[in-house]
Image: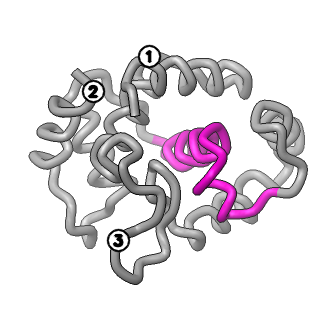
């Protein structure tokens, strides 16, 4: 996927839902580069459940939906529905609706109390700690390499 077109779509989508910032855009670009090689994969290789360019697992999507978005945040949910032109929220929509995947990847990071970083090394650390987690197979070095390969 063309990095410039994806960046434009991320900026547009985050602006529509009121969660745009340069660091959020860069972190999502890096996440897409790391998780799916910028959209090469829309379903996890092997038997894994992750879907979309950010390779989010349905269980993570459900947690965001049930315990964050549906918890007194109906205005944000309405903005997401309008931005994504979707009325029925389903985890598998992240596989084919890029804007929906962008929204949920952003919400995943938005729930973190630590402020967004503003450097490549910071994005890598933040991704590893909050997206991939300590148990995940990915590394910060791998994130940096994929960011340099697909985003820069």
- The residue positioned 72% from the left and 59% from the top of the image is 65
Helix, strand or loop under label 1: helix
Q: Name the residue under label 2.
A: 151
The colour mode here is one colour
Q: Which of marks 2 and 1 is in front?
A: 2
Left or right of 24? Residue 133 is left
Q: Position of residue 147 (x, y in %)?
A: 22, 34
State which quarter of the image contains the C terminus: top left
Q: Name the residue under label 3.
A: 45
Could you tell me residue 118's position as x and y percent? 30, 22
53 inside magenta stretch: no
Which residue is denoted by mark 1 in the rendering?
A: 22
Between the residue at mark 3 and the residue at mark 1, the CA separation in whole angstroms equals 30 Å
**Which numbered mark, 3 or 1, is in the foreground of this view?**
3
In the drawing, does residue 138 fall left or right of residue 70? left
| Residue in the picture at 44% in, 58% down | 55
Magenta stretch, residue numbers: 89-113
Please tell me how many numbered marks the rendered image carries.
3
Q: Is the residue 24 above or below the residue 131 in the image?
A: above
């Amino acid at each position: 996927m063309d990095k410039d077109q994806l960046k434009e779509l991320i900026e547009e989508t985050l602006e529509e839902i009121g969660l745009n910032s340069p660091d959020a855009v860069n972190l999502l670009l890096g996440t897409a580069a790391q998780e799916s090689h910028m959209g090469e994969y829309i379903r996890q290789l092997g038997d894994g459940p992750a879907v979309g360019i950010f390779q989010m697992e349905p269980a993570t999507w459900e947690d965001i939906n049930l315990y964050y978005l549906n918890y007194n945040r109906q205005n944000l949910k309405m903005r997401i529905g309008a931005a994504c032109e979707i009325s029925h929220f389903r985890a598998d929509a992240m596989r084919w609706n890029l804007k929906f995947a962008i929204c949920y990847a952003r919400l995943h990071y938005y729930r973190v109390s630590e402020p967004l970083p503003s450097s490549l090394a910071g994005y890598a650390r933040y991704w590893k700690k909050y997206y991939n987690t300590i148990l995940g197979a990915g590394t910060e070095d791998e994130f940096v390499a994929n960011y340099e390969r697909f985003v820069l």
